[in-house]
Image: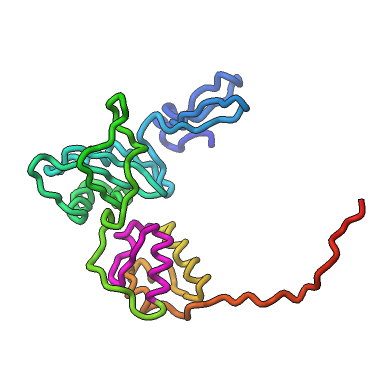
Amino acid sequence: ARGYLGLPQLQAERFIDSPFVAGDRLYRSGDLVRYRADGCLEFLGRNDFQVKLRGLRVELGEIEARLASHSALREVVVLMRDERLVAYFTLRDAATAPGIEGLRGHLLAQVPEYMVPSAFVQLDSLPLSPNGKLDRKALPAPGQDAVLSRSFEAPQGEVETALAQIWAEVLKIERVGRHDHFFELGGHSLLAVSLVARMRQAGLNADARVLFSQPTLAELAARTVGHVQRLAIPATTIPTLNRKRRL
């Protein structure tokens, strides 16, 4: 890329003159790296809290500020784990936990949906490093209770059971009920493509558009064509060959 079309201010901020090659330019990525002894570059992190999510640049600090405006929250941290946004928060003294649906609604009123975390983890306190700073690496992975889940009802039938297993693997969660909503559990358009591909591998066919219009497990199962495919690998008929080679 040579620059940003129609965005001179952003171009001046991100593209700089190269100190190595006269007349060339470099892109200021915001990534922090260091040279290793073997000459390779080791990625250390970012010099800001900006991440790229599904092709869109997301400023984590903005999400944190919007979420922290909720009257019940005291501290808020947002980071990206496994290609999804996860919010960690602590409550103010004597405050009642607002619930995941309440926090999602609070953010949806202020930011686009792609900036709303798919998981919300309540902590008694945020982990700190020995020098008293936030230790982001010590933040726990979100569990099943961190995502918006409807009242659980076990999947019914072979198709729903197979879909529930595929959803759990794609979304990286432990349990999926027949009334759970794919996008409320952290799904997005890219994961939807992966889900449809996994379904086809299992012999279950559904148009990707169906998932967006019928996003619960039971609804998708009702619109799915096919049957659960169990692959049987036949014995090979290739004869055993002498693989000795002449040198």
Residue 187 picture quarter: bottom left
Q: Nearer the viewer, residue 40 or 66?
A: 40
Q: Residue furthest right?
A: 246
Q: Residue at coordinates 28% horizontally, 56% vertically from top-left?
A: 147
Residue at 20% in and 42% down: 124
How many badges with numbers are in the image?
0
Determine whether 149 is above or below 12 in the image. below
Q: From the viewer's perspective, is 68 left or right of 194?
A: left
The single residue placed furthest to the left in the displayed view is 94
Q: Position of residue 7 (x, y in %)?
A: 41, 35
Q: Nearer the viewer, residue 11 or 201?
A: 201
- Is residue 164 covered in magenta? yes
Q: Which residues are magenta?
A: 160-188
Relative to 46, residue 114 above or below: below
Left or right: where 103 falls relative to 50: left
Residue 246, above or below 48? below
* Residue depicted at x 66% and y 77%: 234
Quarter-of-image position of residue 178: bottom left
As for residue 111 lying within the magenta part, the answer is no
Position of 70 with respect to 2 (left or right) is: left
- Pinpoint residue 182: horizontal percent, then vertical percent: 34, 63
Examine the rendered structure and indicate whether residue 169 appears above or below residue 236. above
244, 47: nearer the viewer: 244
Residue 119: image x %, image y %? 29, 51
- Coloring applied to the structure: rainbow
Residue drawn at the location 80% of the way across and 73% of the way down:
239
- Describe residue 83's horizontal placement relative to residue 146 as left or right: right
Give coordinates of residue 171: x percent, y percent. 39, 59
